[in-house]
Image (cartoon, grey):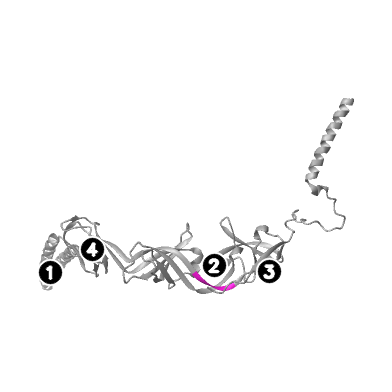
Amino acid sequence: MPRRLLTIVVVLAIAAALAYVYVSRRPELMAAPPPAGAPAAAGGRGGGAFSQRQVPVVTAAVQQLPLSVQIEALGTARANEAVEVTAKTGNIVTAVRFDEGQHVRRGEVLVELDGAQARADLAAAEAALKESQSTFTRSRDLFARQALSESQLEQIEATLRANEARVASAQARVADTVIRAPFSGTVGLRRISVGSLISPGTVITTLDDTSVMKLDFDVPEAFVAVLEAGLAVEATSVAYPGTLFEGTVSSVDSRVDPVSRSVTVRALIPNDEGRLKPGMFLSVRLSRDPTPALVVPESAIIPERGSVFIFAVEDGIAVRREVMVGRRRPGQVELLRGVAAGDRVIVQGSQKIRDGTPVTESAEAPPAAGPV
């Protein structure tokens, strides 16, 4: 019996020791309950003191300011018109009428092919046509004197029309033996020689109209609303340091790329001196006159998981809002949605708060700069 009593005493002592250790690590359990009618302790909503403690923050007002469009991108230069000169039919080259790098005019002869057979076929077709025309003329006189039936006259007329078609076909084959420039431009390297047997589709040379260059570049979809024909464009190339090429936007693609979330813009740049070449890589800067925009300091922006947020202050409470970012300039960002002019946004201290935290606003941040 004494041994059993001793065991019970030891167990109770161990339990008391464990209880003491637990309570000592949770001081809030040792606090006496508040007297009846006393106000609830901080943290009554949600059970935490963080949501009730006022956190000092620095805020700034959302301002409506004139903001200019400044877009920088990378683009590729393309010829205004470009084509690979080829032959329609297989034949032998008899003459080359251009020099590499030569400027040619529309309709100018570039290459001549062997046309002996085509001209012979044309002569035969023209002879048959002449005979058909004579026969048809005599047949009309006979038909008028009722010496020829109407069906016979129609058959002779059909033969005449067929011979006219053969002449037209022969003329086209003769024309195909002379390859002409489809538009004015500069020819590239010659890829054939006199005596070469070429087949349909064989590239003879290239022809580019580089008097005006097309410059294609991609712009983020956030700027789609401000893109339009006529906007000024400035471009630079590493090939010509310090040289500025100026042009204007000619068109904007009708679709936004669903992968890159960008739209292709095409600008036209005069190239009278011929310094720009097709395929050149250019840095592009696009600008537009200032337009009204809702602007906040850049420090108010909180990126998170592909979205952008800010903390606005409403009646002393921090409220988290999702926003859409538009144009930027040093230290400031345009917001396209989520705020209104005059709203107060937190620019310092947002890392110490969360949605619903009571805050104390300190002195307002310096006002935004003027239009740029």
Query: Looking at the picture, how far across and down is residue 358, in whole percent?
Result: 72, 61
Tell us which disc is closer to us: 4 or 3: 3
Distance, label 1 to label 4, CA atoms, is: 48 Å
Q: Residue drawn at (46%, 65%), measured in percent from left and top?
A: 72
Q: What residue type is labelled 2?
A: Pro
Q: Answer whether labels 1 and 4 touch (C-beta < 8 Å).
A: no
Q: Is residue 18 visible?
A: yes
Q: Which stretch is magenta?
A: 64-69
User: Quick check: 339 left or right of 246?
Assistant: right
| Residue 363: numbered disc | 3
Q: Which residue position is annotated with label 2? A: 330
Q: Can residue 344 be seen in this view?
A: no
Q: Residue drawn at (79%, 41%), measured in percent from left and top?
A: 21
Tell us which disc is closer to us: 1 or 4: 4
Query: What SS does tag 2 mark?
Result: loop
| Residue 133: numbered disc | 1
**Number of labelled discs?**
4
